[in-house]
Amino acid sequence: MTVIDDIKDRLDIVDIVSETVKLRKSGRTFIGMCPFHANTRTPSFVVWPETGTWKCFGACNTGGDVFTFVMKRDGLDFKDALQLLAGKVGVELEERKPEAEIEDRQLARLREAVAAAAQWYNHLLGNNPNAQVAREHLTKRGFTATTIETFQLGYAPDDWHGLQTYLAGKGFSIEEMVDAGLLVQHDDGRVFDRFRHRLMIPIHDGKGRPIGFGARALKAGDEPKYLNSPQSALFDKSRTLYAL
Ligand SMILES: [Zn+2]
């Protein structure tokens, strides 16, 4: 576990945001007035404790994690935000090169993007009408609801920008989605969802965190039949063992 993950694990983003923003629980989220723009009427600031992320749906239209929140709030650079949050949870920081911290942080963001994608695909497997064929495929092969949840199997919808829109709403940048292997980028800059109308099988690292996907075609003639996440900073194909 990187020091970033360690700190995030021990921190509750709701506590940190609540230091300066009055939050109200709303289902699985917390909402409040955005501290980063003149937000006085309808609360536009949302915090997701499960993913440790936040987003302003108002004028800012931006979001991030607990680190970006503290950086923005206190006007800190990443290194100082790290010091501050490490101090709060009693994590000892080794003296490391700043580049190493930045790399850790970028990796943590990619990991979060893949985890959010896995959750979304998993949700759609149970809820998207077009996922029927994926559910039948699994039932025929003897997968139970428990197995599906354990492996967090999912369904990627037949949509060129479905995941992109979803993750943008969670505060992830296009660059992060491309780097995580979730979007494909053309030379001219246009992007689209890599996985469409496929059964999604998350591939985990040694700590059980999803870092990529194996994706099976659901329509006869869709090639390739199995499409995997590309090699990325997160997903080292030569080193990852398939759990399934
Ligand atoms: Zn705002």
Image: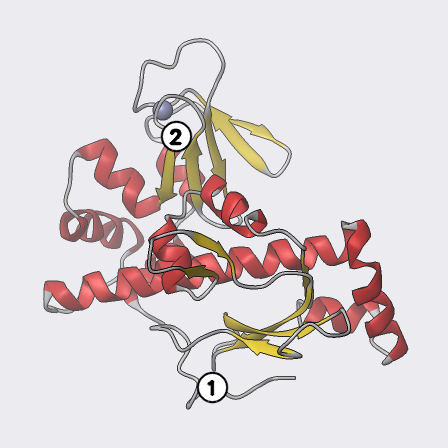
Asked if labels 1 and 2 touch by Cβ distance under 8 angstroms, the answer is no
Q: Earlier in the sequence, mark 2 or mark 1?
A: 2
Question: Is 32 situated left or right of 135 in this image?
Answer: left
Figure quadrant, ligand 1: top left
Determine the residue positioned at 45% across, 57% down.
113
Determine the residue positioned at 45% across, 48% down.
52
What mark, if any, has residue 81 been given in the picture? none
In percent of width and height, residue 178 lies at: 39, 60
| Quarter of the image that includes the N terminus | bottom left
Quarter assignment of residue 144: bottom right
Name the residue beneath numbered marker 1: 240
Q: How is the image coloured?
A: secondary structure
- Crowdedness of circle 1 by 10 Å Cα count: few (<14), some, many (20+)? some
What mark, if any, has residue 61 been given in the picture? 2
The total of numbered circles placed on residues is 2
Determine the residue positioned at 45% across, 43% down.
168
| Quarter of the image that includes the C terminus | bottom right
Determine the residue positioned at 48% across, 32% down.
46
As drawn, 30 above or below 5: above
The residue at the far top in this view is 41
As drawn, 5 above or below 150: above
Question: Is 105 situated left or right of 179 in this image?
Answer: left
